[in-house]
Each structure stands twice: as C-alpha cells, then as structure tokens.
Image (cartoon, rainbow, N blue to C red):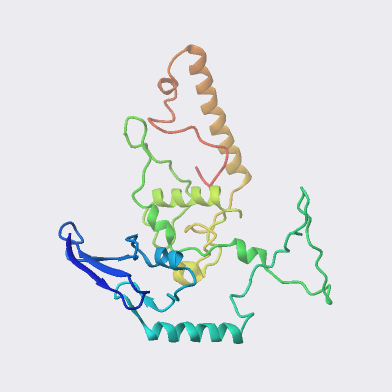
Amino acid sequence: MDKQGRTDCPALPPGWKKEEVIRKSGLSAGKSDVYYFSPSGKKFRSKPQLARYLGNAVDLSCFDFRTGKMMPSKLQKNKQRLRNESLHPNKGKPDLNTALPIRQTASIFKQPVTKVTNHPDNKVRSDPQRLADQPRQLFWEKRLRGLSASDVGQEILRAMELPRGLQALGPVPDDVTLLSAVASALHVGSVPVTGQLSSAAEKNPAVWLNSSQPLCRAFVVTDDDIRKQEERVRRVRKKLEEALLAGDPAGSRLGGLGRGQRSPSVHFLGGGG
C-alpha cells in the first residue's frame, strides 16, 4: 500500500491525525482506506469505532469519515428527521397482525389476552376456499409432454393404454401427456375427475376451460367398465400368485402385462378397455 502521510483533521479535537492509504494490488487496486489516529497513537478504522471512543465529547452525526470534514447537509437532514419524529411520535409502520398478544406475566404457561370489543358480532369475513385455491397456469399439461418413466436399467417403460372413453381435448398432443394429466388430477386434485363437461370447451378451450379437470372430453364410467377392470386385476393377480408359488421371476410368468408394465390398479379412469 502507498501511504500519503498523516494530516491534521480540523473536524476532530486537536492532535487527531488522518491517514489515507491507497491499495496497490488485488482486485481493489487503486482504492483507498482511511484511518484516524488519536493523540496517543491509537488507530481507528471506522466511524463507529471513532464514535465509541469519543463518546459525547464530539458530535459525529454529520462527520464524513472519508473526507474528515463536517457535512452541513447531513446535519440539516438529521435535524429535519428529528423534527418530524417530534411532530409525529406515534407514526410508524402499521401492525397488520390480527393475532391476540400473549399476556406478559411471570408464568410457565402462555396466557392469552382477552379481547374486549363493543361489537361482538363484528367478525372479519374470509373465504377459505378462495385462500386455499391457488391460480393455475393455462394448459400447464403441455409441460408434461416428452416425459417418460424408465426402470433401473435406464430402459423406457411402455406407457399404459388409455381406455377408449378418454379422448384428448385442446392442445394436449398425445395420449401419454393426457395420461400424465389424469394421473396428476387423481393424486393432487380433490374433486372427482370427469373431464371437461362444457361443450363450449371444445370450440375455445382457452376461454371455457375448467382448470380443475384434465384436458379430455367428458366421460362416464359404467358398472360394466368397473366389472371388466376388476376382472382384469383378478387375472393378473392370479398369474402373479402362480409365478411366486412356482419360484420363477414374476416377470417371466406375467406375459399378459408386457415388459416394464405394472399390474393395473382398481382405480378406473374411463369407459372402454
């Protein structure tokens, strides 16, 4: 570092010196550091250190540490701030927390404060359904396009075949994307999956789309569809039982499922096989 020498600081009491050191290397080369030295030779690197040492002997509120001078503009701003605080002592940030405070008494248990009001029927109205429902991006199912599952050997699993009753609607490109959208609606949604019931959604899905339902035409699951699905599950479970009893790998005896396919679930997604 290049020292420019110590100079007197007229803003501080007699005997105080100011020193500016220019950095010669590193990323901050060319910048300078300012230090102050007391008459006894003690070094100060910042304004807070200087204020703690001098205490109330010197008012450093308008003292500029880098230049070593008193700045009248800072003094004027401080006076204006103090004047505003004296005129508005209660002015501050509004407290938007409506929770009752805790009684500040010596007790091992938290004792709530009793709220007394002149209007006991004055209640804050809130719609919990509105707060619970989060906005959804239009046609968010398009982000599921191109996604596929794979096994431990990094081989892509064959996708399930959708029932004939499930038909894509709008910008959904293929059955694989529709399958992912229906699975997401079953696991995440809290309403029954019925598809888009409004016929206007086929003409202009961007306007009449029901965001809580997947992008598929409305479908109805009949009792016959449920019986067919249950029978299919029963047959697959029977094959799995026979394979386990015979001691063979499960995949070698379940020829009806195909490589990488899981056994069908009893949850039926739509009409048809």
Q: Is residue 120 left or right of residue 222?
A: right
Image coordinates for residue 223, horizontal then vertical, percent: 63, 44
Image coordinates for residue 45, horizontal then vertical, percent: 33, 62
* Residue, far top: 246
| Residue drawn at x 39%, y 32% as measured from the top left | 260
Q: Is residue 63 left or right of residue 19?
A: right
| Residue drawn at x 71%, y 71% as measured from the top left | 125
Viewer-proximal residue among 18 and 212: 18
Q: Quadrant of residue 68?
A: bottom left
Q: Is residue 221 left or right of residue 65?
A: right
Please say if 148 is above or below 256: below
Asked whether residue 138 is in view, the answer is no
| Residue drawn at x 49%, y 85% as measured from the top left | 79
Please say if 3 is above or below 64: above
Q: Quadrant of residue 114?
A: bottom right
Viewer-proximal residue among 5 and 178: 5
| Residue drawn at x 60%, y 38% as measured from the top left | 227
Q: Is residue 105 left or right of residue 205?
A: right
Quarter of the image for the N terminus: give it.
bottom left
Viewer-proximal residue among 23 and 2: 2
Image coordinates for residue 167, horizontal then vertical, percent: 45, 55
